[in-house]
Every structure is written in structure tokens, then in C-alpha cells.
Amino acid sequence: RGAAMLKSHESEEMYLETIFLLKRRKGMVRSVDIVEELGYAKSSVSRGVNLLLEKGYVTVGRGGELAFTEKGYEKAASVYERHRVITRVLRSMGADKELAEENACRIEHIISEELFDVLRAYDEKI
């Protein structure tokens, strides 16, 4: 994949995961919540949310509340699962919590399904 395509994919997944986590924590999520959580400019978040809308991952209700479509929820839950599994595997290898979390955030966007399956199987054994 080209660098721009990879960056776009990573950004999309970051938005999905952020919405997923905010919904778990707060229940209701609007674009302004993403701005506050990630510290991104409003214009960047607006662009990101519009891309999620175009791809059919989210809908926007009255008052700007973001809701996942079934497809969006599945994708967001998958990204979050990758994050959790990678973090646990890195922690089991001796990385402290902060180091494991920080690197899982990067790795989760570029890891192949094949390697993730290996990490998931390892995580289930430990």
C-alpha cells in the first residue's frame, strides 16, 4: 500500500476506535467529543467523520449524535480487539503498560490478519 492510503486507513481506524471507546464510556458521542479526545482540529474531525459517513460506518442523528451502522460497529470492535490483544501480548513479553499501549496503537493499523491470528492464538494460551 502507498503511504497516503496507509495513513488514510490508519486515520479511519483511529476514528472508529475512538468513537467505540467514547460510546462505551459516555453513551452518546458527537464530533466535538472526538475533537476533545484526540486533540485534533475541528476541521480534521469533520473530514474524518464525513469519510466514515461516506463509507457507511456511521450515521449522524439529531443534535449531531454519531451512531454506528452494523458494518461500522463490526469494524470498530475489530480494531479495538486488535488493540487489546496486541497490548496483552506486549505486556506478557515484559513491556510496561504505557509502552505496550503506545505501540499497540501503531501496530494495530498495519498488522496483517495472518500475523494477528498468530498473536490472538498466543494470547489465548497465556
Image (tube, helix red, strand yellow):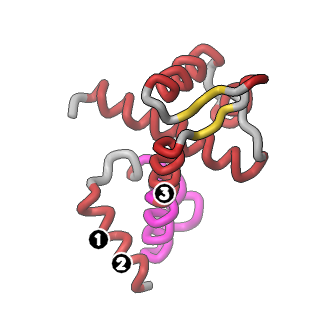
What residue did someone put label 3 on?
83
Q: Nearer the viewer, residue 20 or 93?
A: 20
Find the distance from the CA under tag 2 to the CA under tag 3. Answer: 15 Å
* Amino acid type shown at disc 3: His
Question: What is the number of callouts on the image?
Answer: 3
What residue did someone put label 2 on?
122
Mark 3 closeness class: few <14, some 14–19, many ≥20 residues within 10 Å: many
Q: Nearer the viewer, residue 106 or 122?
A: 122
The answer to which of marks 2 and 3 sits earlier in the sequence is: 3
Q: Quick one: quadrant of the C terminus?
A: bottom left
Magenta range is 82-106
- Under circle 1, the secondary element is helix
Magenta segment includes 97: yes
- Under circle 3, the secondary element is helix
> Farthest top residue?
43
The answer to which of marks 3 and 1 sits earlier in the sequence is: 3
* Residue at the image point whose x is 58% and y is 40% from the top: 68
**Left or right: where does residue 109 sit relative to residue 39?**
left
What residue did someone put label 1 on?
118
Q: Position of residue 82 (x, y in %)?
A: 44, 58
* Residue at the image point whose x is 28% and y is 57% from the top: 113
Q: Nearer the viewer, residue 12 or 72?
A: 72
